[in-house]
Structure formats: C-alpha cells, structure tokens
Amino acid sequence: MAAPAPAQTPQKFDPKTAQNLVEIEKQFAVKAVEHAQTYWNLLEKVPPRELKLSKLDDEIFEHTMTAFPEFKDAPHEGLTKLDEEWLKSADGKDRWREFIKPYENRVKDYNFGSLIRTDARLEYGETNTIFVMRMQFYAIEIARNKLGLNDGAHAIAKADAEKERAKAEKEKAKGGKKGGRS
C-alpha cells in the first residue's frame, strides 16, 4: 500500500481570506484560557513587581514605554484600563504591529492569542477579558507588574485562593465526619 501524499498548501492560498476550522479555533481558545489561568495563578503566588514573564522583560518594558508614551505617565490610566476600541483601531493595530516585529524570532509564540484583563484592578471575567496577541499581553502585563498596577490583582488572587483552600478544608472535614460514623 502506498503512503498518502503529504498535504500541500494551495499555490494561490491567501491567509487573509482563509476560513478557520471550528476545531482549530476551539484548540486556540483552550490554550488562551489555560494561559490566562496560569498567569492568574502566578499573580496569586508572586508579588507582581517580582514576577518575570520572559527573559526579555526589561527590554520589553523599555520598548513599551518608548513605543507607547501614553502608557508612561502616572497614574497610567491607559495601562490600568485598556481601551479596546483603540486596540482594534487602524492606528492601534499599526502601532502594535510595528512594536511586535522585533520579537518575531526572539519570543516563542509571540503571535499566539492570549486573554488579557481590560481592567488591571479586576480579575479575569466575561466583561473584563479581551483577546490579544501574546506580545501585546507581555508588553501590557510586564508594564502593569513593574509599575505596581497589578498589586490589587495580586491581593484578589491571594484572597480567592484562600477562600478556595478554606472551602476545600471544610469539605474535607465534612467528608471525614461522614466516614467516621458506623
């Protein structure tokens, strides 16, 4: 029996008009959610100012502040509460595209989708989460961490984790009492 021919990309393939397969979209969504959960867990365990997201954190931070001077000035409102409309605007897309270029061959998965909180003071949630490219996530979250804008999220994450631990202990104690009866 002959081996099947390898799949080939059509010669006139245009990625701008290509349709996404539902299964592939679901896999990307699952990866983005896993990434967000991992990041939230890190915010719980590590004070944000001490958190390193990549080997290039300092460089990414400096580049972010240079490329987006509107993020630089205290109280950093543009970083605390992201303007989704601007991110999706032609100007926003162009500026981010230029920002990302130097990292194409230096940051793994630089163009993967990631979920980011639109308001740094709140946790991930349906109304506080948007989809961005991984380098946008790094740039924004590294800046939020270094500038102390995620300190409140750190406190929320720690409180949530403590509530979950207390709930688990309570359930465990309940289970122990039931098992002890004859």
Image (tube, rainbow, N blue to C red):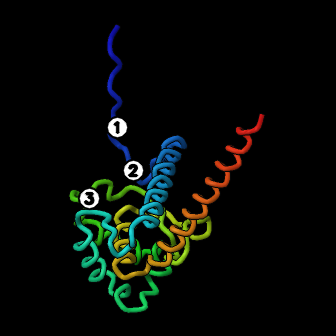
Question: Are the residues tagged 2 and 3 within 8 Å (C-beta)?
Answer: no
**What amino acid is found at the position of numbered circle 3 in the picture?**
Val
Q: Quadrant of residue 67?
A: bottom left
Q: Quadrant of the C terminus?
A: top right
- Residue 132 position, x and y percent, is 44, 64
Marks 2/3: CA–CA distance: 22 Å
Quadrant assignment, res 78 = bottom left
Query: Compared with residue 104, is residue 81 higher up or lower down, i.e. above or below?
Result: below
Q: Which mark is residue 69?
A: none
| Quadrant assignment for the N terminus | top left
Q: Position of residue 154 (x, y in %)?
A: 47, 72
Number of labels in the image equals: 3
Type of amino acid at the residue the image marks with label 2? Pro
| Residue to which mark 3 is pinned | 107
Describe the element under mark 3 as helix, strand or loop: loop
Q: Kindly identify which residue carries mark 2.
A: 15
Question: In the image, 13: left or right of 161?
Answer: left
Q: Which residue is farthest right?
A: 182
- Position of 81 relative to 126 (above/below): below
**Element under disc 2:** loop
Q: Residues within 10 Å of mark 2 (few under 14, many from 20)?
A: few
Look at the numbered discs 2 and 1 and tell me whether their residues touch, using CB distance below 8 Å: no
List x then y, in percent, for residue 40. Answer: 47, 63
Of badges 2 and 3, the one in the foreground is: 3
| Front-lying residue, 97 or 51 | 51
User: Looking at this view, is 88 or 174 the one in front?
Assistant: 174
Q: Is residue 157 above or below residue 35?
A: below
Q: Amino acid at mark 1?
A: Thr
